[in-house]
Image (spheres, rainbow, N blue to C red):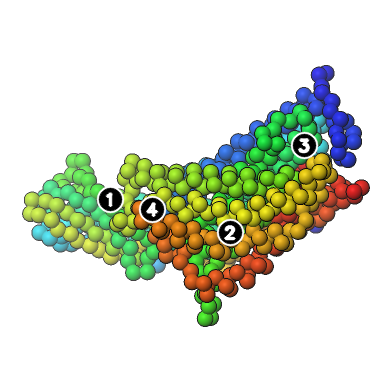
Amino acid sequence: MTQSIIQGSSQETTREYSFTPSWLSERWLRQGTSILILYLLLQAELGLAWDRNWHDLVGRDRFWIPPHILLYTGVGGAGLVALIVIFIETLRYARKHDGVDDTSTIPVLGYFHAPLGFVLLGFGALTDLLAAPLDNYWHELYGLDVTLWSPFHIMGTLGGVILGLGAIYMISSEAAYERQKGAASWRILGLSGPEWCAIILLAALIEIALPSLTAFTPANIGTFTLLTYPIPLTMAGVSMLIAIVQLTRKPGAATLMVCVLFLESLGTQSFVPWAIWTTIDRLGFTFRYPGVTPVFNVSIVCMPLVFLLGAIAIDVTAYRQWADKPIDKRTSLKRISLLGLIAAIPTVFLPPLIVDFFRLFPSIGFPRDVLLMLQPSWSDIFPVLLLILIVGPVFAHVGSAFGDIWHLSKQ
Amino acid sequence: MRLSIWLGIGIALLLVVFTLVYVNVSSDSSVAKIGNQTLQAGSYTVNMGFTPDPPQVSNTLTVTLTPHNGQQLSGRVKAVPGLGTDASTITAPLVSEKGSSGVLTGTLTLPVRGAWQIVAELNGPQGQGSAQINLIVAAPHAIPLWFGWLLGLSPLVGVIWFFWQQGRYRRLLLLMKYQHM
């Protein structure tokens, strides 16, 4: 039997790993389906961004509108692929296929065996697909513009969180196997294929939080106003920036992720106005309010700048801590609370400054909600700054903990 | 422990499925029928009827306009949200039914329950005219708000449990990996 044998250098790889054809076929199956699922989730995310703008500009005349089709085929497709992988892995587990055992799968319902990521993906997709008709029902009862905080929007969001977690577990376990392969694994900029996929996916998860700039309206508590948009930006941004460095154990990953986030944001904001104009023209829809039409949202495109300072601080800290150590000796990142603070504070100050900067150029159009929302007074900023000083470090630790798991887990 | 987790997931799924079945087979029977109404649209006298009657939310609603004296008319029909109905205006063209003497039909899908105004805008040999009628769109029975929130938040239990379980898993992984360092 043809096989290549590579001596592992880490403590966990003191035994020899045999990269048999069946073991490699398992990697092909998991990595191939991971890439397919990543594509479907990015498609769903694009559908979500389109859908949000569609609701604002066109309305919600029926369930089967084009953005819903893009969104739900992405979610449903990812769930279906996960289900197929669960069946194949169960079969392979029963046949004692090389690379499919209790260290690489978890038991489900006492009968199935599959990688944790695919199981989570299946549950996330199921949750989202159950939330969809219930959300439609809620809209029928209570109207088109019901707030984000409706029961089945929350259910859909929770499904999305489970889906996203599943996708990261799915990809990160393959990144762990690629590290095990050592020199046999191809790399670009020192990162393996699954690590690149993880960067794209985590950047996409931050991108989902960017519209919170206008979706999270200020809360009036007594005599002061609490700005809420920095909270989801901090939760998503800080946790993911630290998680990606912990996952890869490579300095530079956080800054690279901000660059990828910028590209994703640019792609989404270019696609959405084009898609709305195209479908409006071809399918005979009309805009809800005369004169309110889609525009290229330059403020959202530039929002990744908010995370740049934090990313550089995290990467510099990682470099100082890990530069002289081989990858399997790189323990968890230190000074997590401080890094959380550095990454979180710009989420309060920078969004209004970015909008103010672009308002110097009258030719740049802004969506209505951006102009309405992002003009806070300094007195509004102080209460949320205090809150962010707590949320930032807490979510830095959450990101760090998950980053450790994603670095080490092969399930 | 494991049995109780799967039992919880099973119960939550059953609740969701039962809710979906319930809201799809039941509808609010308190909404009255509209019947065939005779209206004056400028110089034209028309009968306006609806199928189904009363209109149901998210179902196709066919508006039928029958001009008196068999006049040949054209135009469009609009559904304008009434007071308290959170929706946007919907417009559809009125088309002549084949083989009928001037009968016009337009199809609308009203996405939200509650008060709506149906406006017919007509063109014909005697100029333009419009007529409107107010109606209530029926919806499936509303589930109690608390039950909606219970269903909506049910996945949160699983998420919290998963986070707790992963905290323990992380400690185990770190112990296995770095205990020698």
Estimate how packed mark 3 is, as few (under 14), some (14 to 19) or many (20 or more) residues with alpha carbons within 10 Å.
Answer: many
Between disc 4 and disc 2, whose residue precedes? 2
In the figure, A17 relative to A263: above or below?
A: above
Numbered tag placed on residue A179 in the rendering: 3
| Whether residue B9 is visible | no
Estimate how packed mark 2 is, as few (under 14), some (14 to 19) or many (20 or more) residues with alpha carbons within 10 Å.
Answer: many
Nearer mark to the viewer, of 1 and 4:
4
Contact check, label 3 and label 4, Cβ < 8 Å: no
Q: What residue type is labelled 3?
A: Arg
The quarter of the displayed image where residue B159 is located:
bottom right
Q: Which amino acid does label 2 sit on?
A: Leu
Q: Which residue lies furthest to the top in this view?
A: A1
Picture coordinates of residue A292 (x, y %)?
34, 56
| Whether residue B172 is visible | yes
Q: Have a look at marks 4 and 2 and say if they share a chain.
A: yes
Given residues A141 and B67, the one toward you in this image is A141
Q: Going by the image, does A203 lie left or right of B98?
A: right
Nearer mark to the viewer, of 3 and 1:
3
Element at label 4: loop
Residue occupied by mark 1: B92
Estimate how packed mark 4 is, as few (under 14), some (14 to 19) or many (20 or more) residues with alpha carbons within 10 Å.
Answer: few
Dot 3: chain letter: A
Alpha carbon separation for disc pair 3 and 4: 46 Å
Residue occupied by mark 4: A364
Picture coordinates of residue B116 (x, y %)?
32, 63
Residue occupied by mark 2: A233
Q: Name which residue lies at 81% across and 37% down.
A: A101
Task: State the quadrant of the C terminus of chain A.
Answer: top right
Element at label 3: helix
In the figure, A235 relative to B103: above or below?
A: below
Q: Name which residue lies at 33% across and 48% down.
A: A285
